[in-house]
Amino acid sequence: MARDEDKKRQARKRFIFERQSVPTICLALGISDSTLRRWKKDARQHGDDWDVARSATMLALRGP
């Protein structure tokens, strides 16, 4: 289970901060597309929307 949590953290980082695509993340981490999409959905239900965080990060990096 700890390994899944580590992969989940890596997936989140790659998606939000490195702006990698879902297929790229899945290939790199050795997980299925459905697993990654489930992790995103679960996170959103607990108040951590990866898509919103990704958009906010992109806007913040652009600056004023």
Image: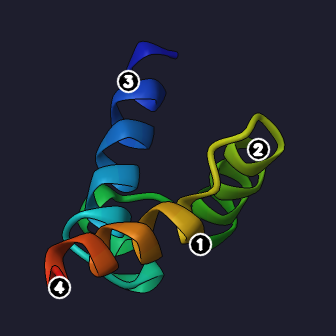
Q: How many marks?
A: 4
Name the secondary structure under disc 2: helix
Q: Secondary structure at mark 3?
A: helix
Q: Are marks 2 and 4 in contact (CB under 8 Å)?
A: no
* Residue at 16% over, 80% down: 63
Relative to 37, residue 55 above or below: below
Q: Is residue 35 left or right of residue 25?
A: right
Q: Which mark is residue 33?
A: 1
Label 3, on which residue? Answer: 3
Q: On screen, 12 above or below 45?
A: below
Residue for point 56% across, 71% down? 51
Q: Which residue is mark 4?
A: 62
Dot 1: what SS? helix
Q: Residues within 10 Å of mark 1 (few under 14, many from 20)?
A: some
Residue holding disc 2: 42
Give the distance between the C-alpha atoms of the residues marked 2 and 3, in whole angstroms. 17 Å
